[in-house]
Amino acid sequence: MLDELLGRASLKDRIDELEEENERLRSRYEAESDRRAEAATARQDAEERVNRLEDRIAQLEGELERTSEDETGLSVRHRHQLRGGRLEAVLDRLESFRTGAEGALTVGVSDGGLSDPVRADLEPVLGDRVALVDDAAPCLCCVDDEGLLAVTLDPPLVPDREATWRDRFALEREWFLPTGRHAVALIRTDLFALGTYEGDERVDYRGFESDVKGSHSKGGFSQARFERIRDGQIDDHLERCRDALAAYERGGENADVALFLAGQRGVVDALVDESALEPAATAAVDATGDPEPALEDAVRSFWTTELRVL
């Protein structure tokens, strides 16, 4: 009676309603937190399983390749990683090769392998070993019509070159070696480095690191929150990378400079897909450490060509 007289009864009823509403919201929040934690845990479990399966696939593919080589005897005679002076010496030898008219074939082989017309040209010379050219794709293939010389090369810039028969191999140094003014950018989830070069000499540099959280081993809501924070930090970092590259391209002296992107494959692909960048070439490289030394490692890896002697 006293509560009603003082008007407190309605207030108490309102308080009870708000407490009930608060309890409902708390239950929904906890359920949503549990759902997100379970989803994060399931995602991590799935990623771990994918990684295990990919490792197993790589192992089985290696065993299959070794088995195929044992059964067929198909394997490259020599395989070399070439850069710098050694690469130039090999190119000199290839360019010095001479034969009769239309006796030397140079062809760019895409990811899809040899085209049927080129395969028909090569099979009389290489026989079953033509399969090794498909294995090396994408690559450049140089073969003479007598089978005295047969190699593939995977330079940083694999040209879209149709089959060319001449008295010598049709090679361009800029496919293999740093020439003229160009730029190489290294991009990781936490690092950016950009060097401008005149030939193999660096004339300009800029780089930075971003604060991106590393791996996390805890489960539950804490892990889900951690992953959201980390994803946001990576997005912010890639935005900084896009801004840095855009500022570089806006520079008047860089308008016609070839830009090469290297780094973590998924990160590089995402950056290209989400921007207006049109790099001359991209490459996956394993470059760790601080920005400047990591860029040096990336440039060394980028300008490396694998030679396979068939």
Image (spheres, rainbow, N blue to C red):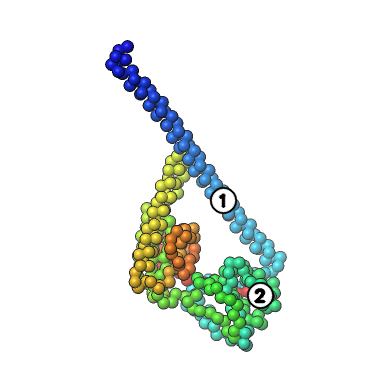
Name the residue nearer the viewer: 165 or 147: 165
User: Which element is circle 2 on?
Assistant: helix
Q: Position of residue 306 (x, y in %)?
A: 54, 71
Q: Residue furthest top?
A: 1
Q: Residue at x 37, y 58 (%)?
A: 240
What amino acid is at disc 2? Pro
Viewer-nearest of discs 2 and 1:
2
Choose the circle earlier in sequence order: 2 or 1.
Answer: 1
Q: Residue at x 53, y 72 (%)?
A: 158
Q: Which residue is mark 2?
A: 117
Quarter holding the C terminus?
A: bottom right
- The answer to whether the residues at label 2 and label 1 have Cβ atoms under 8 Å apart is no
Q: Residue at x 36, y 62 (%)?
A: 244
Q: Is residue 49 above or below residue 58?
A: above
Q: Which mark is residue 68?
A: none
Q: Position of residue 11 (x, y in %)?
A: 33, 21
User: Which element is circle 1 on?
Assistant: helix
Is residue 182 toward the left or the right of residue 304 in the image?
left
Q: Is residue 61 above or below residue 303?
A: above
Residue 153 appearing in the image = no
Q: Residue at x 44, y 75 (%)?
A: 178
Is residue 85 toward the left or the right of residue 62 in the image?
left
Q: Position of residue 230 (x, y in %)?
A: 42, 49
Q: Quadrant location of residue 150?
A: bottom right
Q: Position of residue 268 (x, y in %)?
A: 46, 61
Q: Residue furthest left?
A: 6
Q: Quadrant location of residue 7?
A: top left
What amino acid is at disc 1? Val
Name the residue nearer the viewer: 147 or 108: 108
Is residue 106 toward the left or the right of residue 289 in the image?
right
Q: Which mark is residue 50?
A: 1
